[in-house]
Amino acid sequence: MAFDNVCKILAEKYPTDFARWLLPDEPQKIKVLKTELSIEPIRADSVTFLQTESRILHLEFQTRAKSKPPIPLRMLDYFVRLVRQYDVPITQVVIFLQETSDEIAFTEEYVNEMTHHRYQVVRMWEQDSALFLDNPALLPLAPLTQTDSPQELLSQVAQSVARISDRETRQNIAAYTEILAGLKFEKDLIQQFLGEDIMQESVIYQDILQKGEQQGEQKEALRFCMFLLNERFSEIDTSIIERVQVLNKEKLEALGRALLRISSIADLFIWLDQQESN
């Protein structure tokens, strides 16, 4: 879910840029709507609703093709709720982040014997990188675009990041970009172009670390480490969780820093073994 969350953050921080990308007409005014809908509340971190003057843009970010309920039915459900609540035209776009051959990624409608509902699908691996490289708001998605040369694409991404003049924006965009690039590229290749030092300087990283240090509580440091572990490896074995949970605050903070270098579960086990032997 970390990858979906990054996209949600970007869409809500730069709603106009996403609306310009996905809507045919230039929006004059746009605002972010809450992600909870009426009847029985639906909450999903990967959902963003953007309201322009005359329509709502519903964005659904997906890393996996499988979901429960299935994506086509979920889009119909959202559509009905949005129309009931706002009574304006709705544009729905499912953005698939990770390349897949699953037919769901190529499906743009929900059909049963009584209902036919259409929505749009964007497959990031088919998108031209030029649009994303020239726009800082969309730049973190650039590593997921079409390319015949991964190294050349990551080099172009790194150059685009470096051209962002505002330091805080540059650091945050670099952090978002590194996270999303992990959907497509090996960590070693990413770090050749998007260095660890940029990630460490990121306001996002520093904010998480600072909260743990200021509050001086082990649970905050543990939460920080679990956040990074989930971003690095998605699903963590319970044996690893148990070993991390018994680390003291200082070792948890050390693990947080080490996770910027650790790229495999094997390396993580080695690090944990070293800590337990000290």
Image (cartoon, rainbow, N blue to C red):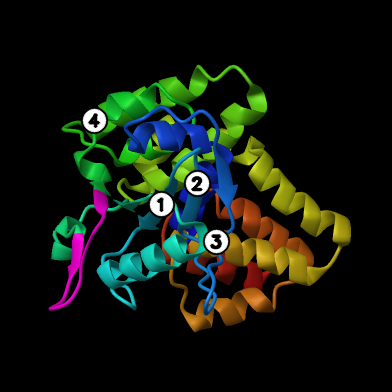
Q: Which residue is mark 1?
A: 59
Magenta segment includes 113: yes
- What's the residue type where badge 3 is placed? Thr
Mark 2 vs 4, N-terminal side: 2
Q: Secondary structure at mark 2?
A: strand
Q: Are marks 3 and 1 in contact (CB under 8 Å)?
A: no
Q: CA distance from mark 3 to mark 2?
A: 10 Å
Of residues 79 and 48, the one nearer the viewer is: 79
| Left or right: residue 32 compared with residue 94 | right
User: Can you identify the residue that label 4 sits on?
Assistant: 128
- Front-most of 46 and 56? 56
Label 3 sits on residue:
35
Looking at the image, residue 39 lies above or below residue 152: below
Q: To which quarter of the image does residue 145 belong? A: top left
Which of 231/122 is in front?
A: 122
Disc 2/disc 4 C-alpha distance (Å): 24 Å
Label 1 sits on what residue type?
Answer: Leu
Label whose residue precedes the other's in the sequence (3 or 2): 3
Residue 50, numbered circle: 2
- Determine the CA span between mark 1 and mark 2: 8 Å
- Which residue of the protein is positioned furthest toward the front in this rendering? 87
Stretch in magenta:
109-121
Q: CA distance from mark 3 to mark 1?
A: 11 Å
Q: Nearer the viewer, mark 1 or mark 2?
A: 2
Q: Is residue 209 magenta?
A: no
Q: Nearer the viewer, mark 3 or mark 4?
A: 3
